[in-house]
Amino acid sequence: MDATSAFQDSLQDFLAPSKKGRVVILVFLVLFALMLAGIVYDNQKPLPEPVRYSSEIDSGTYVYLDIQLLSEWIYKVTGDSSHTYYEVMDPDQNWFVIDLPNGTYSELEPFVDAYNYLFYEDMPYAEIPDSVRVYGMARSLDSQTTYDLASAYDVTTTEYTDYFGSCYFDEGSVPDSTAKIIFVSGSCFFGLMLMAMLIQHAAAGSSYKKSDDRLYALGLKDNAEFEFTGVGNQRFEKPKLVLSEHFLYSGAARAVYSYTDILWLYQRVQRHYGVPVSRQLIAGLYNGKSVAVASRGVTDELLYTVSATAKAQNPEMLIGYSPDFARRYRALAKAYKQNNR
């Protein structure tokens, strides 16, 4: 049992979110905002100067390519609509393989018409347009795609890579940013943590409101506030729990419960590989819901004190856990709700 001075002066302060919790939420909010700012900053950084694409280019290089002629698709990756490969010629009559998005390909129709006119018989005349420059990344081809492309040309993979190289031109892509990956990952992590904390905070606020509304409906709100400041109350600092003559005040659940509203009181022990790692004091309420009224500092002494105090006001309360008590509690909660509709 702890000194009264360890607690806030008013019931509202006692049930308010802890300063530590508010600080943690603020910290995660700031970190989340910093990650978003990092993403914006990274997006605004200028791209590196691109180099001319060639069959000897290294994978991961930011490149440009001047398109003079463009074929219709020569290979589509099965089950992946985002990868469609074409044959392209630059103004120096070098041939490469390029991966184009559908939208970009449709904008290059004059180059496709010129290609078809030059290489297929009976195609309508098409003027060769001036070359257009596109930007992207040199990307390595995996072995399966290399094999499939070689098969499309009816050559071996070695013959294919000797001519086209081991990379393809990935139009529209930009260099991967390690910083951006960190910022995106960080924003996802801190954003999820912040959301979880805000949901928990909102749930706690809802618990407080429901508790306050029920006390008001029962005409016990003023009594609960008055008894909270009683000199003879039993106060426990670590579990943030106060016991008065008729009420249990739970800082963990952010709620006040009349002992007559608690039908079942027991200890829940969480174990890891058989070793107890945490203990909670659970209250089974009249409405059939179970609430952890204490999640820290739950000891045998606390359990005994709470049980003795509560049972003195509610002799029918079930104390301790057993399958039989679980069945009886469900029956009591059902009967309670039916009788108090």
Image (cartoon, helix red, strand yellow):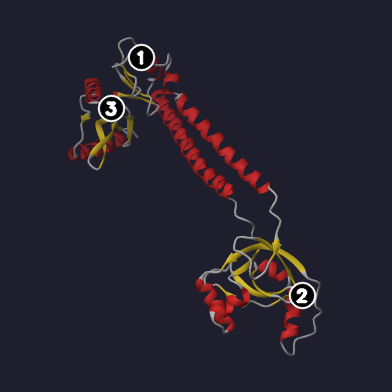
- Marks 1/2: CA distance? 86 Å
Nearer the observer, 53 or 36:
53
Q: Local crowd at mark 3 within 10 Å, few (<14), some, or many (≥20)?
A: some
Q: Which mark is residue 246?
A: none
Q: Position of residue 233 (x, y in %)?
A: 31, 14
Amino acid on which disc 3 is placed? Val
The residue carrying mark 3 is 298
- Marks 2/3: CA distance? 77 Å
Per the image, label 1 sits on a secondary structure element best described as: helix
Q: Position of residue 78 (x, y in %)?
A: 52, 73
Q: Local crowd at mark 2 within 10 Å, few (<14), some, or many (≥20)?
A: some
- Marks 1/3: CA distance? 23 Å
Image vertical order of residue 314 relative to residue 337, above or below = above
Residue 15 horizontal side relative to residue 151, left or right: left
Residue 100 horizontal side relative to residue 248, left or right: right
Q: Which mark is residue 110?
A: 2
Amino acid on which disc 1 is placed? Glu
Kindly identify the residue that appears in the image at 54 percent across and 68 percent down: 80
> In terms of sequence position, does the residue under pointer 1 or pointer 3 come before the other?
1
The residue carrying mark 1 is 227
